[in-house]
Amino acid sequence: MEAPSMDSVKVAVRVRPFNQREKNAGSRCVISMQSGTTTIIHDPKNPEHIKTFTFDLAYWSHSGFQRDKDGVLISTGSNSEFAGQVNCLKIKFYLYFFLIYKRDVFRDLGQGVLDSAWQGYNATLLAYGQTGSGKSYSMIGYGADKGIIPNVCEELFKATENKGKNQQYQVTFSMLEIYNEQVSDLLSKTKKAGGLKVREDQHQGFYVDGLTSVPCDSYAQIERLMEQGLKARTTAATSMNATSSRSHMLISIQFKQVFLDGDLTKQSIINLVDLAGSERQKSSGSERDRLREGSRINLSLTTLGNVISALADVAMGKRVLHIPYRDSVLTRLLQSALGGNSKTLMIAAISPADVCYEETLSTLRYAERTKKIKNKAVINASPTEKLIKELKAENNRLLSKLAGLGNSGKRVADKTSSSDVGQAPSNKIILQGLGISDKHATFTNTDGEVTVTPQSKCRVIVNGVPTVTKTTLQHLDRVILGSNSAYLYIGFPSERSSEDLARFDYDFFQSELAAAEGVSVDKLGALNDKDGKVDPSILAVFQDYIKLIPLVAEANQMSEELMKGLKMELKVKNLASSDSKGYDLQKEVIVKVTNRETQEVWIWSKAKFINRKYLMEEFYQHFLDGGDIHVAQEDDPFWDPIEAIHLGSAHVWLQSLAYGIKLEEQVELLNSEGLEEAIVLINIIPCSSTGEANGEDDVVIDPLELLGKRIDFQIQIIQCLGVKWLKENTRRGIQIGYCAPLAPECSLWVLFFSYKIYDLPITLYTKPVWKNVNAKIEETIHFVALNASHKFLNYLQKNALIVDLWGLQEGCAELNCTQEDLITWEGNILVDNTKTLTAQETNQGTSNQMAELYLKLLKLEQETELLRNINRELREENMLLKDTLRGCSPGQGQ
Ligand code: ADP
Ligand code: MG
């Protein structure tokens, strides 16, 4: 066996010509190159300000070229520094070529890939750069300017023709695309919904299950396949409403050489990758929570950057916690190329133009980090089948011997042997990793019974369940030590059968943990569907969940070691929640963060958690490097401003309103898991325009009786009983929020606040109540629906009012009581269904005026009513007085 060859990733920079747009804009070239290896970039704002990068190669493809009669770009002559795709003279006039030797991209990079392949090394070539910088041009090429991939393939077949008789070759070709973390097979006509799955195999590492892999025996065949694949790529991009600039294309060539005389097989996998455009995506959210290097649109590219950074740190001798290969599809597939068994090359494609300065600089910096990675490539040679057969036979003999021993009651090891596991060198088994203690656990074999005993407080999980005491292991038990070190226990030969070990992959371990926490695809409600089909959105939630389990464990471990006192827990939002019609709400994975000491609680979205996890790792790394960990609160990844927390919600069905019936309810406020958080006392009372509750007479038998009429009703929130949030900590408070009941189809709300937009439901919050487990609220809001429409009446019959319970904690901002604005106008909210007033038909200005007019109208109506009442009273009084007067008149003596 040959020693592995330690190699840095080889990096080449290539600068392309100006494109038409850049020419039209009068762009200046900010790139210069020297001595074939140095790239210099000038800051366009400050031309003296330059940065110099030295890589293995620097290709000047910016100027000094012309087109030959075949349309190929070639150098203008011996003064030109131009580097083309392939020096066409090479093939035609070999001698002449040496005389006017011109550098070309294929010669260095392509030939490098080929040489590795012939020697039996795996080889990987990546093209990196912003969209339009020349990645595809270099890798695939356009028209007569064929790129590296076609040239590599052509040369490969050419060379096989010239090799001896005692050698046989096998070339297989596959081509895939990764877009939005989904893998599609570019050589398959049938598209699989959701893409192909990336699986892990003990020997093969990660691979794409079900990917078409075509055995090829000529370059012409490969050329056809590539054409077909590229066509599929553009079609797919168009149908996904994206551009191919957002997807990665990966061509894999498996090259096998069989040496018949030496009984030797050499095998090489050549990965050729045209990466997605590296330009930073616009990100949203606060500066701190923006995802690093762009948004999640291209998780694979972001992760590639993180993997490269981590590997560069490893190469510099830094202690690195975790290399996030698993975080994206691309890095899974390139795991061995980046940090393992592969000779790896990268071409960094750049634009020459001043406007691209920032992006180009970032590409060069990326290349600089990549350059630091060291790979350990080994020749994949194995004795051919004869030897393999012999070895297999030998192994079988040994296995049956062992099994025989087992059956006869004699074990391999029949005396007690005991091994401690942990970080300390004194352990028999030394285990590094997050969450592994100096002495973590003890494995003991007593007469063939193997047990694991955790040290106190050390995390040991068997088959998904945490254990604290001595536990006997059975063949194929899954053992997790610390945050994330996972093992499969293989029992003695007598216990084994022909089981398929491959199914116990990483996902299996995590799914099992999830199941132990009560989360599985079934529990998430995937099978609720009548047709028995699994809802893909639920599968996605489950995948998110199991992906986050190890990350959350690691985050907890870091928090503990840094004494941050945070407890992070994975939860599923909306696990048992439904919308106002009673349909399930979209579920998503969230992380609940609790400060053990202060009991402050935060809820983080998945994206926020993942981003924080990176920041925590950086912070932790800094700590391991001996740095100071006391930072300003705002810079602490373990800290966040305190906010109100959504605790649960209740459904109050509005049906009775459609019949004019009063509703007095005590409803459970349920959290997202369906457990009771509190009870709310709430009344919905049909009333008169002045707020007096309606009587029996106002009840209708058919809601249609209310059609076109005005409906007044009040929502009274009386009290919240037994609030769990306050039982846990009495210094806390609560607020209740609910959306004003209006049919979503009714865009005809007249709103009170000029800043509100039509169609948006208004959320009303009660005033906060602090420090009371049975919080008294006692708030009433009056609603008015003018001209009750069919839609509105229908809405009342089919929908519920969703009442939300919010938890307040010391120091958090209270939720905005939009009511304040309402109450200024006598506590009425107006629902109008008059056809003329729709958002589409009126602009904001007029709608505001209309709103005002309605308010005035309503007020006038009430005043009139009041006047009428006064009038009536006066008249009655008048009559009474008159009567009295009449009685007292002198003509009527007593
Ligand atoms: P990318 O794949 O990085 O998005 P392309 O390879 O499609 O970019 O290149 C964008 C444009 O620039 C294409 O029209 C291509 O022909 C041209 N181009 C790129 N690199 C070169 C080069 N070295 N020489 C000549 N033209 C180039
Ligand atoms: Mg491209």
Image (spheres, rainbow, N blue to C red):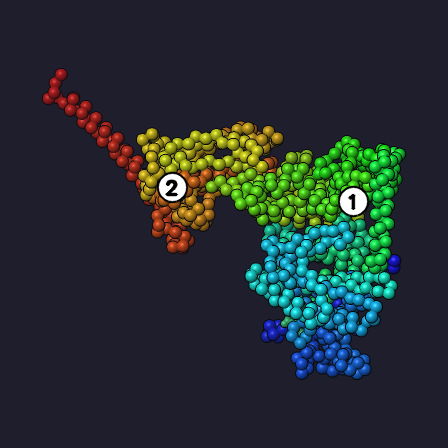
Query: What amino acid does circle 1 point to?
Result: Gly
Residue 433: mark in rendering: 1
What amino acid does circle 2 point to?
Answer: Leu
Q: Quadrant of residue 160?
A: bottom right
Sequence-wise, the earlier of marks 1 and 2 is 1
User: Is 730 or 413 nearer to us in this picture?
Assistant: 413
Which quadrant does ligand 1 occupy? Answer: bottom right
Question: Does 684 sit above or below residue 395?
Answer: above
Distance from Cα at disc 1 to Cα at disc 2: 62 Å
Classify the position of the C terminus by image quarter: top left
Q: Which of the 4 image quarters holds residue 685?
A: top left
Q: Residue at x 76, y 50 (%)?
A: 202
Tell me where residue 73 appears, x and y as whole percent: 69, 78
Which quarter of the figure is the N terminus placed in?
Answer: bottom right
In the rendered image, which residue does mark 2 sit on? 793
- Residue 143 vs residue 384: left or right? left
Near-viewer residue (735 or 576): 576
